[in-house]
């Protein structure tokens, strides 16, 4: 399964919501030393109930808009 994600960092509360085909994800961590991407993978793995290694960032590693592949769904 491949999804489009729009990420907001430095939020007060972490959350995931879906609007159409795009997932809007708010993260507490800042985009520094890959901490936001790590929290993104943690959030998606618990939301979709899959292991962390099955989530891969295909595009947008340093961008707010990302293309993510989730294997096993």
Image (cartoon, rainbow, N blue to C red):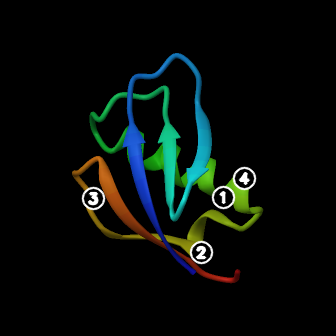
Q: Report how far apart the C-alphas of labels 4 and 3 lie in the structure.
A: 20 Å
Q: Which residue lies furthest to the front in this view?
A: 20
Q: Report how far apart the C-alphas of labels 1 and 3 lie in the structure.
A: 17 Å
- The kind of secondary structure element at disc 1 is helix
Q: Report how far apart the C-alphas of labels 1 and 4 lie in the structure.
A: 4 Å
CB within 8 Å, label 2 to label 1: yes
Q: Report how far apart the C-alphas of labels 3 and 2 lie in the structure.
A: 16 Å
Q: In this view, does 29 lie above or below 17?
A: above
- The kind of secondary structure element at disc 3 is loop
Q: Is residue 11 above or below residue 58?
A: above
Q: Looking at the image, which is closer to me, 30 or 66?
A: 66
**Residue picked out by circle 1:** 45
Q: Mark 4 or mark 3, which has the lower sequence index?
A: 4
**Residue picked out by circle 4:** 46
Examine the image and state in which quarter residue 10 appears. Answer: top left
Q: Report how far apart the C-alphas of labels 4 and 2 lie in the structure.
A: 12 Å
CB within 8 Å, label 1 to label 4: yes
* Whole-percent x, y for residue 17 in the image: 61, 45
């Amino acid at each position: 399964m491949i999804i489009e994600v729009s990420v907001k960092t430095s939020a007060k509360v972490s959350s995931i919501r879906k609007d159409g085909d795009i997932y809007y994800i708010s993260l507490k961590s800042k985009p520094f030393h890959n901490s936001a991407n790590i929290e993104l993978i943690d959030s998606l793995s618990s939301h979709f109930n899959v292991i962390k290694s099955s989530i891969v960032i295909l595009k947008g590693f340093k961008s707010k808009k990302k293309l993510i592949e989730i294997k096993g769904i």
